[in-house]
């Protein structure tokens, strides 16, 4: 893997010392003065929980190197602070992996920080029916995701049954994505939004990356509505997140979820029929 930027130039070795191995990692070139600054955060991976770092490339007279652009100082020398977050290799200290852009980090109201890039990549890479995915949740207690369907998939987002069928189909991939995330960062089913690919397709950069800010702005109303639905479900006693597969063996989790669903269903039917608990549940021909 190679790494560089227009502002700082090529920053890695041209050829890996072990070609083919650890392909997602790279080593910084020895003729670059690179400084590592821990963020105090982790990568959010529930299995590794590796520390994350910001990295600055410093002007070096020894190597006759100057970043094309500087935006900070290190030891009183001009430097360029890279916009990305990095994670070190678990065993080879000279190798680094890009986690994602620092400004893409989602800070939930609980204090949990979500690094969306690897999670979004896991969902897209693990489900052919998904063209792109964009997580959201800044300032909220839970994170969610907007999913853009692949060109071969036709879902009418205004037909609830079609949306539910599609979410059912991709839910195993979302569960696999969730398995990599800390509990607070796991996507709730109520917060899965299927994008209107015809009227509001995702905006992309020339490099093919999703324009995060533009898409979040475009889908602001849908995101607000999703949180309203989630809050209604939670107020009615329904867990916002169904138990993951590995939790179905825990009787307590299953009972809690089922009780919530039954309570919410009864309450909803009562509000539709005008009946209340203790009254005849069959009103106007509507049976619970």
Image (spheres, rainbow, N blue to C red):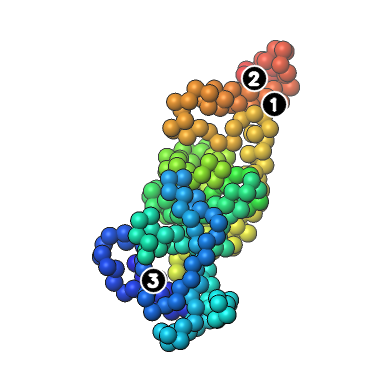
Task: Report, in whole angstroms, how far the alpha carbon at label 3 lies from the one at label 2.
Answer: 68 Å
Image quadrant where residue 192 sits:
top right
Residue contact between numbered discs 2 and 1, judged by CB atoms under 8 Å: yes
Please give the label number shown on residue 272: 1
Q: Report x, y in % for residue 25.
A: 36, 62
Task: Say above or below: 74 vs 129.
Answer: below
Q: Report x, y in % for residue 94.
A: 37, 65
Q: Residue at x 32, y 61 (%)?
A: 23
Q: Residue at x 64, y 29 (%)?
A: 237
Q: Residues within 10 Å of mark 2 (few under 14, many from 20)?
A: few
Name the residue at the left extreme: 19
Camera-near label (3 vs 1) is: 3
Q: How many marks?
A: 3
Label 2 vs 1, first from the N-terminus: 1
Task: Report, in whole angstroms, how far the alpha carbon at label 2 lies from the one at label 1.
Answer: 9 Å
129 horizontally vs 288: left or right: left
Label 3 vs 1, first from the N-terminus: 3
Specify whether residue 204 is in view: no
Disc 2: which residue: 286
Disc 3: which residue: 28
Label 3 vs 2, first from the N-terminus: 3
């Amino acid at each position: 893997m190679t790494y560089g930027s227009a502002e700082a130039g090529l920053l890695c070795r041209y050829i890996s010392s072990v070609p083919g191995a650890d392909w997602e990692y790279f080593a910084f070139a020895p003729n670059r003065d690179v400084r590592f600054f821990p963020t105090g955060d982790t990568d959010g991976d529930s299995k590794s929980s590796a520390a994350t770092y910001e990295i600055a490339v410093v002007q070096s007279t020894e190597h006759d190197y100057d970043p094309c652009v500087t935006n900070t100082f290190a030891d009183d020398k001009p430097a360029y602070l890279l916009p990305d977050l990095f994670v070190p290799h678990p065993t080879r200290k000279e190798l680094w992996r890009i986690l994602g852009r620092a400004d893409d980090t989602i800070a939930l109201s609980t204090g949990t920080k979500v690094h969306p890039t690897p999670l979004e990549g896991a969902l897209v890479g693990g489900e052919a029916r998904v063209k792109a995915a964009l997580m959201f949740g800044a300032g909220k207690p839970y994170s969610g995701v907007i999913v853009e369907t692949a060109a071969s998939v036709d879902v009418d987002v205004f037909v609830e049954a079609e949306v539910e069928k599609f979410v059912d189909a991709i839910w195993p991939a979302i569960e696999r994505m969730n398995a990599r995330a800390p509990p607070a960062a796991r996507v709730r089913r109520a917060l899965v939004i299927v994008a209107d690919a015809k009227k509001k397709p995702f905006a992309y950069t020339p490099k093919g990356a999703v324009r995060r800010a533009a898409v979040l702005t475009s889908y602001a109303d849908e995101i607000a509505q999703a949180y309203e639905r989630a809050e209604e479900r939670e107020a009615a006693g329904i867990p916002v997140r169904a138990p993951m597969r590995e939790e179905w063996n825990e009787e307590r989790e299953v009972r809690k979820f089922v009780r919530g669903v039954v309570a919410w269903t009864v309450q909803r039917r009562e509000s539709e029929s005008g009946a209340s608990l203790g009254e005849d549940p069959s009103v106007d021909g509507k049976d619970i």
